[in-house]
Image (tube, grey):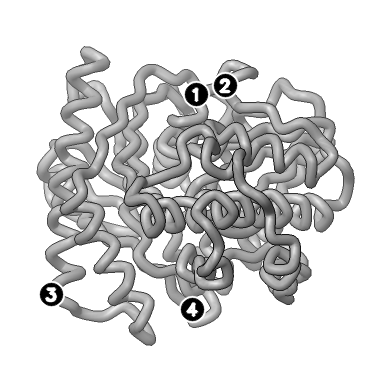
Amino acid sequence: MKPVFAIGLMSGTSLDGIDAALIETDGEDHVRPIAFRALSYDDATRAVLAEAAQIALTMEQPGENARIAAAARRLTDLHIDAVFGLLAEAGVARDAVGVVGFHGQTIAHRPDRGWTWQIGDGAVLARGTGIDVVGSLRVADVAAGGQGAPLLPVYHRALAAGLPRPVAILNLGGVANLTWIGADGELIAFDTGPGNGLIDDWMMAERGERFDKGGALAGVGWIDETLLGKMLDMPWFDQPPPKSLDRGDFTIAPVRGLGAADGAATLTRFTAETVALGLGLLPGRASRLIVAGGGRHNRTLMRMIGEACGITPEPIDAIGWNGDATEAEGFAYMAVRSLRGLPISFPGTTGAPRPLPGGALHTAAGSSGAGA
């Protein structure tokens, strides 16, 4: 297939905003990043999305809810704005873009119950932008018995084609996930733990701030080793991959009562130790640990990961990639794979019974259907 321009859109569980990336790709070996733009959510939008997630986590399965529907409409409109903003910044006409990969916003991830829920209307996005959209990228995997996450490993493998193997790529978003690429290209991937999620929640609760900038607060705190040990005493961490979890599976309750700095330090070390436990589940030692996602900007977290894992974590930017754009680029890449009928999830990444394509196609003209 001839390479095409594709846009990827990602709104993560950190609720910080929309990442929009434009790449040129054939969905296989050819990947050329072209442009990236981040659109930050205002406080009101974050509150609406957080409420939608709180409601969804109380439900036995996805269903109708007026507040969730309103959040989905708001989210979709903002994604339309993100597409046009990216195109304007890149100086690219929308007619030049072949497809948009639309992740939507995860409000609940319950593969143990057979479902995962990402809000956002792909059909409205397609009509609003005039570009075909591939959405619902996790649904087919979960329906087949997979975890539905993580999906980025297939893109990680494409980006890491020139690196010595085995190599591990860690994504530090609201939830952290790890990709291991073996010498023969074998993929193993799974969520490791809370990523930035608990640290962000703690900062909001204690300081009214969205995140611990640079890890400054955690860097002056003391780690409560007793509490840390109790938090790590969770059977899930010992389960073999593939496995995934929801950001809501962890809370800051265990460290309530600690001072702001000590709580930040303990939660930061918790994330680091869960990464180390994850690395211990891999079939071999990685030659390098490459880190993407917002957490790579947290110097204290990166230091603690190095201490816990016995390997120096390297920001993905150091090897020429844009760590802020990686997830959005990945969904653009997967959208092209979906159009080609190529798999986006695998037995070693999600527990799918076989390599599976995924995604639902929404054409700009208004028709919808399953991905090829």
The residue that label 1 is drawn on is 322
* Residue 28 in picture, x, y percent from top left: 56, 32
Q: Residue at x 47, y 42 (%)?
A: 212
Crowding at dot 2, Cα within 10 Å, few <14 / some 14-19 / many 20+, comes out as: some
The residue that label 3 is drawn on is 66
Of labels 2 and 4, earlier in sequence is 4
> Mark 2 to mark 4: distance in Å?
36 Å
Of labels 3 and 1, earlier in sequence is 3
Q: Secondary structure at mark 2?
A: helix
The residue that label 2 is drawn on is 317
- Residue nearer the viewer, 102 or 44: 44
> Mark 2 to mark 3: distance in Å?
41 Å
Query: Is label 2 or label 4 in front?
Result: 2
Of labels 2 and 1, earlier in sequence is 2
The disc labelled 3 sits on which kind of residue? Answer: Ala
> Mark 3 to mark 4: distance in Å?
23 Å
Q: Quadrant of residue 358?
A: bottom left
Query: Is label 1 or label 4 in front?
Result: 1
* Residue 166 in picture, x, y percent from top left: 82, 36
Query: Can you say whether 40 is above or below 62 in the image?
Result: above
The disc labelled 2 sits on which kind of residue? Answer: Asp
Q: Residue at x 83, y 54 (%)?
A: 280
Q: Residue at x 30, y 40 (%)?
A: 18
* Residue 213 in picture, x, y percent from top left: 46, 35
Q: Looking at the image, which residue sits at the far top?
A: 91
